Amino acid sequence: MNMKPSLKPFLAVFALTLMSSCARHNEYSDIVSVIPEPQEVHLFGGFSDADGCKRNDVTDRTLGGEDYRIFIKDGKVTVTAASERGFLYAGQTLMQLRNAEGKYPDVEIRDWPRFGHRGLLLDCSRHFFSIEEIRKVLDVMALHKLNVLHWHLTDDQGWRIEIDSWPRLTEVGAWRTGNRLGRGGTDIGPDNEPYGGFYTKEELRSVVGYASSLGIDIMPEIDLPGHMLSALASYPELGCTGGPYAVMAYGGISQDVLCAGNEKTYKFIEDVLTEVMDVFPYEYVHIGGDECPKNRWEACHKCQTRIKALGIKSDADHTAEQLLQGYVTKRIGKFLKEHGRRMVGWDEILEGEAPLDAVVMSWRGTEGGIKASGLGHDVIMTPNRNMYFDYCQGENKESEPDGIGGYLPVWKVYEYEPFTPEMTDEQKSHILGVQANLWTEFISTDSHLEYMLLPRLSALSEVQWCLPGRKSFDRLMKDMSRMASLYENLGYDYAKHVFGVIDQHRSLEEGVEFTFHTAGEAGIRYTVDGSEPTAGSQLYEAPFVVSERPATVKAAVFRDGKDSGIYFRDILAGKAYHRPLLVNTEKAWNYKWQPDESLVDGLRGGTNFNSDSFVAWNEEPMDVTIDMGEDAQAYSSVTICILVDKLNYIFAPSSVEVSLSDDGERFDSVAHLDVITDRPSDPDCLREIPVSFRESNARYIRVKAPVVNPIPDWHPGRGHSAFIFVDEIVVE
């Protein structure tokens, strides 16, 4: 464990690691191999002996607070910065500049971060992590030049911060009876054993000090008015019903929330935040505001009385209860402002007209950030699709450690751009930065925690630090092998996917194009006929197109005669390939980003649902029309390829109906298939549902598939609508 009083020992290990790393090459990215990539680099062509160099630090207050300059030539190193953080970042860059021969390149570097907020959220409520592990997380954040730890300290599953004025929060709220978080409802330990823990104020202050020495601020989060079951279990009088309540021993969201009509609730909040502010000096305090069910407020006499007293009335955009949450948010924001702090909340706070000085964290995609910046709010972009590090790093979750599902490989983190095309320059000025979030419902050990962070933090750091023109995924992957060596030498676990085949693909009219990457310089060998690749197979040198269908592409990286594991991707046949289509119903709200064309791109997805391979429906049925063209070839079957993942509420549809049309307006049903609802014993898997009918060459095919609604009583989601996830529609 890293119990270091300063960054110096950390950087010393860093230097030794890089001295022993891979051999040097002549390419620019190998001479200056730094993550995140510096903004401006000028090489002079020579090298200086690192051990013989004398470093001279110069303070220049005209530079930005995190900017730095490095000038190396003729055995001299000059570092210029305006603050301690700038000097820290320069030191980290110097460690990476030192090559295997113990030399610095003669170079001038001018560097500064793109964004002021470069954050990482760590959830310690769902699972509790030691102070030693928190310090270790801070170390690896410093390595990647992140500067804000967003510490999620309270939730339905546990209260983790000592509050003197409300002692039962840690006496009761920090502990749950049993621990049924994780895949399949199980995780660590027997269900009847207490699980939990909390941090004393002394421990928290020590972490704040340690973080400060690394150039990192800590932003605490007290999530309210929802996600408060651990507080209600401690003080039942704060809830609408009075309980009884118990700390949640499983994942999900409690319907029980703080009573917004009870004045004692506000005393509780203010007391807690007062003590939080005493421990954490950072300007920003996060109050959550997300996922707050309103059904208790709807039935609560006190809440309804307050709604009437405030004159709150529902409007076209908000219910009265949503506006009541807005009242809670504004009241807390005023309290924090009076104490010299600034409120941060998840994008749901916009539903209740948040105060203008509130910072909005956009997690449900980018829409919240676009809306908030348009209203004049400062924004931190953290969309779940690109920034949720609890998502799996591999496309097939069976090969991954326990996780909530989803699919977030290194390249998907790296491709994120927080400035969207529709943003004005004014809106862009409100984007404070970018943050990744690591929720821990499924993460109970230190090694698992580190595995989920790394190497994705390397990709994140360049999104946060680099101007778009400095980013290069090819260069990042070349540098990744050195970074991985560093992880190993510092004792971090990390995902080894980067040493296998990293696949990016796209469907073109002429076929499917594949682009491969791997860490370092190892060669990738591949086949397109379904055979196993060997060290003698075709060497990957550039993107290639597979035009024949069906086909199976396989690839592997060979190092020291051993393969990295076989990558494969099936390309399906079918007459609907790359045909125009129209989605007639609303897709699931949180998956609207999934591209419609993936339904006819010829590619099957993996078993992680949160990928570009799928299109999802929830409230409304799947309803898709495919234009087979004026010269449509005869066909007699339609197969929908789906994912079943019951833990994540993803079921097969209740039925499939196929209708045909010559004009795209009048459709005749030609086949209907009822589908048996998935049962508990049925396996989660990729599945095909074929529907046959009399041969036809009609131009238009319409496929309808209603969602299961309601989900059966045996499932925790009973009463809700299921999801349908479809990755391909095959017409034959």
Image: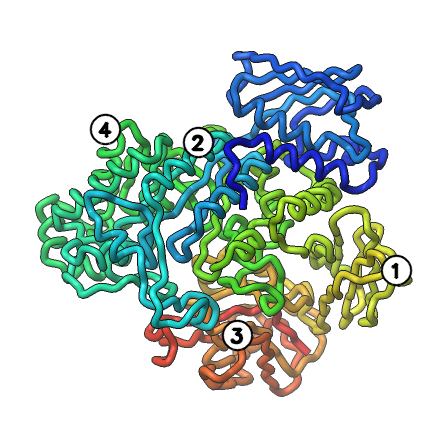
Whether residue 577 sits left or right of residue 559 in the image: it is left
**Which label is found at residue 338?**
4
Q: Answer with mark 2 or mark 3, whichever residue precedes in sequence.
A: 2
Q: Residues within 10 Å of mark 2 (few under 14, many from 20)?
A: many
Horizontal and vertical percent position of residue 236: 17, 58
Task: Mark 4 vs mark 1: give the one in front.
Answer: 4
Residue under the image location 24 percent in, 56 percent down: 257
For numbered disc 4, what is the local secondary structure?
helix
Q: Which residue is mark 1?
A: 538
Q: Answer with mark 2 or mark 1, whichever residue precedes in sequence.
A: 2
Whether residue 462 sits left or right of residue 189 in the image: it is right
> How far apart in space, not on screen, are marks 3 and 4 (Cα)?
51 Å
**Which label is found at residue 644?**
3
Q: Which residue is mark 2?
A: 430
Residue under the image location 45 percent in, 48 percent down: 122
Q: Amino acid at mark 4?
A: Glu
Residue under the image location 47 percent in, 48 percent down: 437
Residue under the image location 52 percent in, 74 percent down: 644
Horizontal and vertical percent position of residue 485: 70, 45
Task: Mark 3 vs mark 4: give the one in front.
Answer: 4
